[in-house]
Image: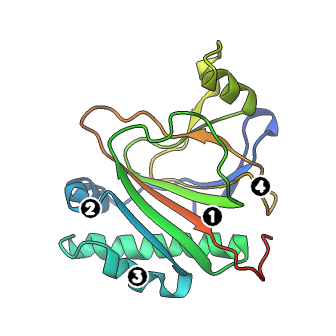
Amino acid sequence: MVSKFELKSVPLGLVPFLLKRRAFPALIRYLLRESLPLLPEQVRIEAPVDSLAGHLEDALPKSLDPALLDWLIADITRCASRLGDMAGTRDLSVRLEKTVDQTCPRFHVDSVAMRLLCTYCGPGTEWTDPNTAYSVNFGDVFDEMLIHQVPPEAIVIYGGANASAGLCPLWHRSPAVAGGETRLLLCIDPIYRSAQTPT
C-alpha cells in the first residue's frame, strides 16, 4: 500500500497523472460486493467538503452495513478533501455510480479542470495516449499493448480539457464489464464559483 500520491506517466512522459495504489480491507471488499444490490444506480451530491459527510449519510441507504456505511463516508470525504486541496476549492461534485455495462466506450477527455476516480468494485478505468485513442475510436489498427488500466481500488487524479495544476488531459474510457459483474465508481470534480479560478 502506498502512503502518498506518486507521480506516474504514460511511457515517454506524455500524460502525467497522480495515482495512489491501495488495497481495501478484506471485510470492506466483501461488504461492498454484497451490498451492491442495495445501492442506487447513482448518488450525486454538490456540496462543500466540510458538509459532505452529512450529505452522504442522508443519500446512502440506511440498510447498508454500519461498518461499510462509515467506511464509505470517510473514504469519499478523504478523497474529496484531497482533490479540493489540489484544485484550490472546497466546493465539489461527488458521484457514486453503479453500472453493469460500458458507459463510455470511446476514449475521451473530460470537460473539467481535473477529476478524481476510484473504482470500488469491478474493472478500473482504461487510458492511453492521444494517437492510440484516435485509432481505437475510428476503428484503425492499433497496438492493444498501448491501452493501460487503472488498478481497482486505486485513486487516480488527472487533468481534463481545462487542465490545471500541472496535469495534462488524460484520454480514457470506461472498461468493458463482464456479464453478471457490477462496477461501482466514485467520481469527484471541483466546482469553481465565479470568483474562483483553477490553480
Classify mark 2: helix, strand or loop: loop
Q: Position of residue 55 (x, y in %)?
A: 40, 82
Q: Real-space Cα distance between discs 2 and 1?
A: 30 Å
Could you tell me the amino acid type at mark 2? Answer: Leu
The quadrant holding residue 41 is bottom left
Sequence-wise, which precedes: disc 2 or disc 1?
1
Q: Which residue is mark 1?
A: 4
Task: Give the SS element for disc 4.
Answer: loop
Q: Quadrant of the C terminus?
A: bottom right
The Cα atoms of the two marked residues, 2 and 3, are separated by 15 Å
Residue 55 numbered tag: 3
Q: Position of residue 117 (x, y in %)?
A: 54, 56
Q: Which mark is residue 107?
A: none
> Pointer 2: what residue?
39
Which residue shows up at 74% across the image and 27% down it? Answer: 131
Of circles 3 and 4, which is in front? 3
| Nearest the eye: 194 or 49 | 194
Image point 52% across, 43% down: which residue? 125
Would you call the spot at circle 2 few (<14 residues within 10 Å), some (14-19), or many (20 or more)? Answer: some
* Amino acid at pointer 3: His
Q: Position of residue 29 (x, y in %)?
A: 31, 56
What residue type is disc 4 on? Leu
